[in-house]
Amino acid sequence: MSGEQPRDPEDGSDSLPEPSLDEPITRPLPVTPDPQVSPPTGVMSAERIAMKVLETRLLGGERKLRRREVAAAAGVSVLSARKLWRALGFPNFGDEDVAFTEQDLTALSTILDLVRAGKLTEEAAISVTRAIGQMTDRMVVWQVEALIEDMVVQQGIPDAVARKQLVSELPNLLDAMEEILVYSWRRQMNAGVQRLAVRAEAGLRASEAGREGDEDDAPLPLARAVGFADLVSYTSLSRRMNEKTLAQLVQRFENKCAEIISIGGGRLVKTVGDEVLYIAETPAAGAEISLALARAFSEDEILPQARVAMVWGRILSRLGDIYGPTVNLAARLTALAEPGTVLVDQTTAAALGQDDRFVLDPQATENVRGFGEITPVLLSPGQGKGLVLD
């Protein structure tokens, strides 16, 4: 029939076309739990009771609401609410799933209020929400595995036992972990604002030297030193190691990289297996970090050496990652570097040329995929102590 509206197969009912996040629903439903839902029967084990108590504490209350009840109370359609839930990484819940708490309603309303007040566009709200969901998901996995590993080592218990025991151990840590999370977020937000907003113009001015203005990266908004460090022979090593030993090697690699990059005033953008991507605000800072990384892995008694490369240029920062020709060139140069060495390009070498802390030695010209003929420059320590590590 021509008057029928399209049916959303996940909603289980006919629905109007999807409104935007700031469009209120004209007939909100009352938020009341269904009296026909019976509480679980039978005797719960001690483990399930502990899990139930932990869940109630983490979720801010018991699950009493369905998705339609939460969406209606927030004044949006289920479709609009589901945009934000998916951005946070929630699974799809059915109409009859009692999966939400009053805290879920508060959180949803908080995000929607930002859109309705014009403080965020719908697109920005979803992007910010997705960032929170993805980063906290990775953070929680990391923290849980770290706690389990510590219990296995310190208490001498099997992994499976530690995972069950974590449920009773975690309540003693929650308040402290939450406090540190908020503290760290505020510090990181302050540092991010400084890097990405306050000092951005100064960085672009500093990047003008040695450039004609018609480079591929010229339109990009941030000037950064972009570096890669890549462990040598990681693939062959991983084939000879068991799962536990390989995990320890990767963790040692990540920890050492994170420490050196942080001490040097840079930022670790991401780790992908045997490789890290990092940035710094000046060519000199990037060079110090790069040399320190190469030296640290050459001196490490467990980890293999690393190939390192760094390029000073312009980038685009989005979704917690960085993009642009500068990033691609740094990756290409990393593959050309010998183990334990650092390569830069000619533009970066020119930016470092007057700094006696660095020695620059041009190498044979290479044909680099996507860039044509490039003359890599070997970067070595000059005068001074370099980056001082504790």
Image (cartoon, grey):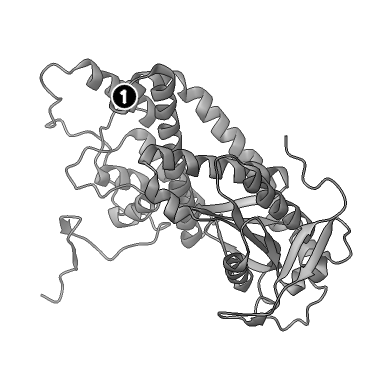
Q: Amino acid at mark 1?
A: Pro
Give the x, y percent position of residue 342.
68, 60
Residue nearest the viewer, comparing 279 with 30? 279
Q: Residue at x 41, y 34 (%)?
A: 145
Query: Residue at (10%, 18%) from the top-left corner?
Result: 42
Q: Left or right: where does residue 335 sit relative to residue 69?
A: right
* Nearer to us in this view, 110 or 211: 211
Above or below — where is 138 with respect to 4? above
Q: Badge 1 local density, few (<14 within 10 Å), some, or many (20+)?
A: few
Seen at 39% across and 28% down, the residue is: 148
Secondary structure of the residue carrying numbered label 1? loop
Mark 1 — residue?
A: 158
Q: Residue at x 84, y 55 (%)?
A: 382
Q: Note whether residue 28 is visible.
A: yes
| Picture coordinates of residue 177, whole percent (x, y) | 51, 28
Q: Where, quadrant-wise, is the N terminus in this rendering?
A: bottom left
Q: Position of residue 5 (x, y in %)?
A: 19, 68
Residue 322 rendering spot, x and y as whole percentages = 58, 62
Residue 372 relative to residue 49: left or right: right
Residue 116 at least partly seen: no
